[in-house]
Image: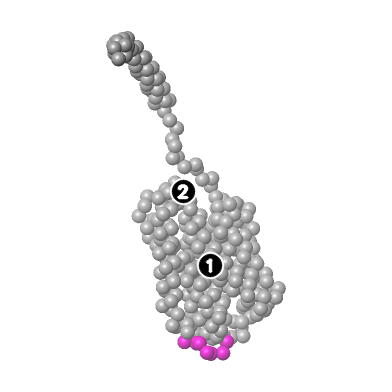
Amino acid sequence: MQTVAQLISPLWLITLSCLAFLILRSTRIGILSRYPALMIYLTLELFLGVIGTCLGLKSLIYWWSYLIVDRVIGSVLVIFMSREMFAEVYFDHPGLRTLTMATLRKSLIVGGITTLLLGPLVLIHRGEPGFQCWQLPFYEIGRCVVFGQVIFICSMWSKLRWLPLNINKNVKTYSLTLCASQLISGVVATMILIFHSRQFTLVSNIVVLVASISVYLTLALALERPQALPLPNYCPAPDLQILARLSDVERLLKQIDASAKLARGIALERFRVRYWPNAAKRRDMI
């Protein structure tokens, strides 16, 4: 087990190096403008890694930073990441935006229910040394969002595969890689809470670090420079012949209005000549 513990430090440094490489390459190819939530999430992960490297993983500053940044802010960013990863798919198909939002809401609800069902397995260690209940809500929030995102990505791909859409490579890389990463993270976090032993935690940390290295390298090497999104063709260019016909119709309507106005004027003059004298005689008789 001592050998396993010694692997944590080099794997930690390799993970931070791969993460820094991913951020630099993504910034260079312009991923920031297309996937801002992903870039903010990766930057926060690098920030936490630097704090853990400088102050130690057991320091209170790192621990509180991890709980607040990764479990709270990170959970919010995961929701935004779920919204933006399929943005290019429904850019030309606005109807899919509603489908995405409805699927995301249902997936988060299912993820929350899954987390609650696993709650009794976690609480069996209540009262044991090292188990602090006040930390449990932070982990539960993270696990709820993680499982919800995995369910969301699987649900979206199960629906999109029936549609004749040309899905971009970046969308596939972003969604599938993140799905695998979150699935491993959620399962490992649940297993750590269930077994709650130092040996299992060390092995689980190595698994998470290896998975993180694979995810960062996959994203760094597979993501491509985003293509310029075409302007939505909601207002096609009008036909010149149609415009000419509409102009003729407009002129015709103006002539009809002028003719109707002239006819009303003539009719009014006849009315005055024909009926006003009789009206004058009647006034004289009165």
> Can you tell which of label 1 and label 2 is closer to the viewer?
1
| Residue named by callout 1 | 75
Q: Nearer the viewer, residue 267 or 219?
A: 267
Q: Quadrant of the N terminus?
A: bottom right
Circle 2: residue type: Phe
Any magenta on residue 30?
A: no
Q: Is residue 170 above or below residue 143?
A: above
Q: Is residue 121 left or right of residue 33?
A: left
Residue at figure coordinates x 63%, y 53% from the top left: 28
Please identify the dominant SS of the magenta region: loop
Circle 1: residue type: Ser
Q: Is residue 73 above or below residue 231?
A: below
Quadrant housing residue 99: bottom left
Q: Is residue 77 visible?
A: yes
| Residue named by callout 2 | 91
Q: Mark 1 or mark 2: which comes first in sequence?
A: 1
